[in-house]
Image (tube, rainbow, N blue to C red):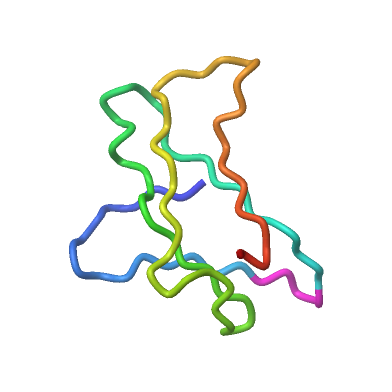
Amino acid sequence: MWLIPFNRGENHLITIDFGSVKTISAVKFFNYNKSYEDTLRGAKQVIIKIDDRLVTPKKGITLRKAPGFMAPEVDIGQEIRLPYV
């Protein structure tokens, strides 16, 4: 989980180091979902690099907004398969 203050014009970066070589086929994002009013707080655009190599378009991938509620039968995550095509 990652929640930080948003500062317009700044980069917001997450770095993941698995400690050894791994094969990754997808990344799954779950946008912020505390309440309907808070769904605007989630990530809107993501760019994914693996070993400094861009694996998504330069402009990034647009993520869906969270629905603002949780239901066990609904998977609100958004899976980005890699490499992205």
Residue 30 rendering spot, x and y as whole percentages: 52, 40
Kindly identify the residue that appears in the image at 62 percent across and 76 percent down: 50
Q: Residue at x 32, y 22 (%)?
A: 36
67 vs 56: above or below: above
Please tell me which residue lies in front, 26 or 59: 59
Which quadrant of the structure image shows residue 19?
bottom right
Q: Position of residue 64 (x, y in %)?
A: 43, 40
Horizontal side of residue 10 vs 43, given as left or right:
left
Residue 28: where, in percent of width, then height?
A: 61, 48
Q: Quadrant of residue 58?
A: bottom left
- Residue 4 within the magenta-colored segment of the rendering: no
Q: Residue at x 53, y 69 (%)?
A: 56
Tell me the magenta residue range: 17-21
Q: Nearer the viewer, residue 67 or 81?
A: 81
Q: Main secondary structure of the magenta part?
A: loop
How many numbered marks have been drawn onto this rendered protein structure? 0
7 left or right of 14 in image: left
x and y percentages locating residue 84 in the rendered image = 61, 64
Q: Is residue 4 rendered to the left or right of residue 76?
A: left
Whether 18 is drawn above or below 26: the answer is below
Residue lying farthest to the left in this orientation: 8
